[in-house]
Amino acid sequence: MRISSGFRASWTALRAMLVLTLLLGVAYPLIVTGVGQLAFPAQANGSIVTVNGAPTGSMLVGQSFSDADGTPLARYFQPRPSAAGKGYDAGASSGSNYGPENPDLVAAIQERKAAVAALENVDPALIPADALTASASGLDPDISEAYALLQVPRIAKERGMAEAAVKDMVQSHVQQRDLGFLGEPTVNVLQLNIALDGVEGRE
C-alpha cells in the first residue's frame, strides 16, 4: 500500500507541531518560570509590597494617594499623573498618545501645573516635567528626585516633621541609574510613603 505524499506531509507537519508545542508551549515556560522563581522570586511574583503582612501595592505599578474625590492627600508624596483608565488602571495601560502641540494635552499640562503649584505653594516654573506629564504606560511607580524634593516642605508641615528629616528620607530612597548610566535617578512613591508612615508610627 502506497502512502500518498499528501499524507506524509500532513504527518510531518503534525509531528513538528507536537514537538514545537512541547518545547515552546510547555518546556520553555516551565524553565523560564523556574528560573524566575529561583533567581528573582519577588519580581516574578509582581514585586508585591506588604505592610504588617497585608499586600499594599506593587513596586512596579503606580497608585494614587488621594481621597474618594480625587483630591491629593497632603500628608503623602504624590505620584506622576496617569492616563491609564481613570488613573493607574493596569487593565487600561496607556499614555494619552497626544502630540506635544495637541490642545487637550497643553490644557491638561496647564491645569496640572496650576494644581501642583497650589498644592506645593511654589512657582510654577520650578515644577519638574514628570509632575505634569503621564508616562507611556500610565503605570509608572516612580517620580524624579526633583519632584520628590519639591514635595518635602508640604510633607514636613503636614506630618510635623523637620524638613531635613524628610529630605534625608527622600535621598535614602533614591534609586540610581541602572548600570550607572541608563535612565535617571528615581524615587519609588509607594516605598517612600510606607517609610513615612513607619517613621510616624515609631514616634
Image (cartoon, rainbow, N blue to C red):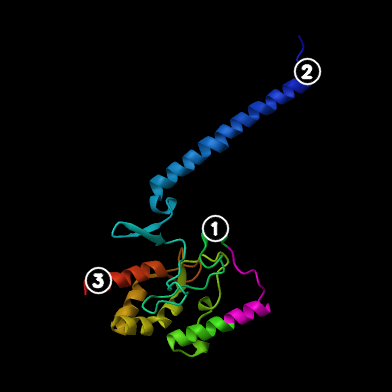
Q: How far is mark 1 from mark 3, CA to CA?
A: 34 Å
- For label 3, the crowd category at 10 Å Cα-Cα, with few meaning under 14, some 14 to 19 and many 20 or more, is few
Pick the residue in front: 157 or 123: 157
Query: Mark 2 vs mark 3: which is more N-terminal?
Result: 2
Q: Which residues are magenta?
A: 94-109
Please tell me whether residue 105 is drawn above or below residue 29 in the rendered image. Answer: below
- Badge 1 amino acid: Gly
Question: Few, some or many C-alpha atoms within 10 Å of disc 1 (few <14, some 14-19, many ≥20)?
Answer: few
* Mark 2 closeness class: few <14, some 14–19, many ≥20 residues within 10 Å: few
Residue at the image position 40 percent from the left and 48 percent from the top: 39
Res. 91 mark: 1
Residue on which disc 3 sits: 201
- Residue shown at 57%/37% (left/top)? 24
Rendered image: mark on residue 4: 2
The spot of residue 73 in percent (x, y) is 40, 76
Which element type, helix, strand or loop, lies under badge 2?
loop
